[in-house]
Image (tube, helix red, strand yellow):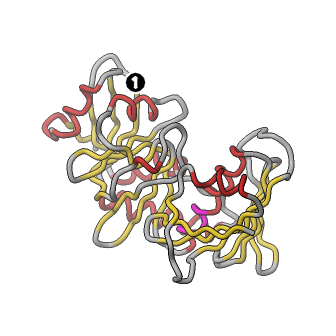
């Protein structure tokens, strides 16, 4: 059994892999560190499970002192406090999705923050998040924002605390290796993307911002209590960070709106 410790935002994850091949699957995006400290989360990885990807639907249920998430291509069994988990998976894609599922549950359980379906770009001393429905342009915006560093291109990790919201480099990537990501930054804005012939940015009120972000959170709830916890954390986010509808052309000129708030129209 191969033991590797990865640093993910402020947490240490200890991976137990039963082969070098599994170790190589995670080393592309996770930053391994030498550490003798206790892990915040210990994960045992085993492949050879289930069938190829057939859809995003996940069954979540609590049984005794365990939480189990199942999909045709992976199975997660964790203790109720998300300190130890076992993942069985079919292939690389299944492993990535299983780790996203587990880590999202882990940070929500601790009321640390949220994982948002989005790209996140560093501009100077702050970060700006870009989210939207499938095909809205998250990957496009990430590409157009170069050479600005990316904190994420698919799943952004947000620490949501009373004194502010911080975005960390995310290992859960689609196209760009996380090892090239930047250092944590305070989150300055959230953009909901709409491709459009002209650039425009409209500020949403806090309630509308929350409602539009609920389905952008990576989370598979097992109970109403857990869902209320997600909403509570999301409310903290929208209380602190402005949310905008960003209508943008497919070029980098939309950054003029983000860096110049005079172009924003507040929607009441």
Rendered-image quadrant of the N terminus: bottom right
In the displayed structure image, the side of residue 50 where residue 199 appears, left or right: left
In the displayed structure image, the side of residue 182 where residue 29 appears, left or right: right
Rendered-image quadrant of the C terminus: top left
Asked whether residue 113 is in view, the answer is yes
Q: Residues within 10 Å of mark 1 (few under 14, many from 20)?
A: some
Asked whether residue 211 is in view, the answer is no
User: How far across and how far down the image is residue 187, in percent?
Assistant: 31, 55
User: How far across and how far down the image is residue 106, in percent?
Assistant: 58, 69
In the displayed structure image, the side of residue 241 where residue 215 appears, left or right: right
* Residue 266 picture quarter: top left
Residue at the image position 29 percent from the left and 35 percent from the top: 147
Residue at the image position 39 percent from the left and 30 percent from the top: 143
Q: Secondary structure at mark 1?
A: strand
Considering only vertical position in the picture, is 123 above or below 186?
Answer: above
* Count of numbered labels shown in the rendering: 1
Considering only vertical position in the picture, is 260 above or below 218?
Answer: above
User: How far across and how far down the image is residue 25, in percent?
Assistant: 65, 50
Magenta residues (range): 103-107
Q: Could you tell me what secondary structure mostly forms the magenta stretch?
A: helix
Badge 1 is on which residue?
195
Does the stretch in magenta take in 240?
A: no
């Amino acid at each position: 059994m191969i033991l590797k410790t990865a640093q993910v935002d402020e947490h240490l994850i200890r991976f137990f892999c039963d082969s070098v091949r599994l170790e190589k699957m995670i080393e592309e995006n996770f930053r391994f560190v030498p550490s003798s400290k206790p892990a915040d989360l210990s994960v045992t990885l085993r492949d050879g499970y289930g069938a190829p990807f057939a859809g995003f639907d996940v069954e979540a249920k609590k049984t005794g002192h365990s939480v189990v998430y199942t999909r045709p291509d992976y199975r997660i069994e964790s203790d109720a406090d998300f300190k130890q988990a076992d993942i069985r998976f079919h292939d690389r894609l299944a492993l990535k999705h299983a780790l996203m599922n587990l880590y999202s549950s882990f940070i929500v359980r601790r009321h640390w923050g949220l994982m948002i379906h989005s790209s996140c770009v560093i501009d100077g001393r702050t970060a700006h998040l870009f989210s939207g429905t499938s095909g809205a342009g998250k990957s496009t915006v990430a590409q157009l924002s170069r050479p600005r560093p990316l904190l994420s291109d698919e799943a952004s990790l947000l620490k949501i605390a009373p004194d502010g919201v911080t975005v960390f480099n995310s290992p859960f990537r689609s196209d760009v290796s996380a090892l090239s990501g930047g250092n944590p930054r305070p989150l300055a804005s959230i953009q909901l993307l709409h491709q459009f012939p002209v650039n425009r940015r409209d500020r949403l009120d806090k309630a509308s911002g929350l409602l539009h972000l609920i389905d952008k959170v990576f989370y598979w709830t097992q109970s109403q209590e857990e869902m209320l916890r997600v909403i509570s954390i999301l409310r903290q986010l929208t209380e602190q960070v402005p949310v905008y509808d960003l209508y943008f052309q497919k070029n980098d000129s939309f950054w003029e709106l983000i860096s110049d708030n005079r172009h924003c129209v507040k929607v009441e």
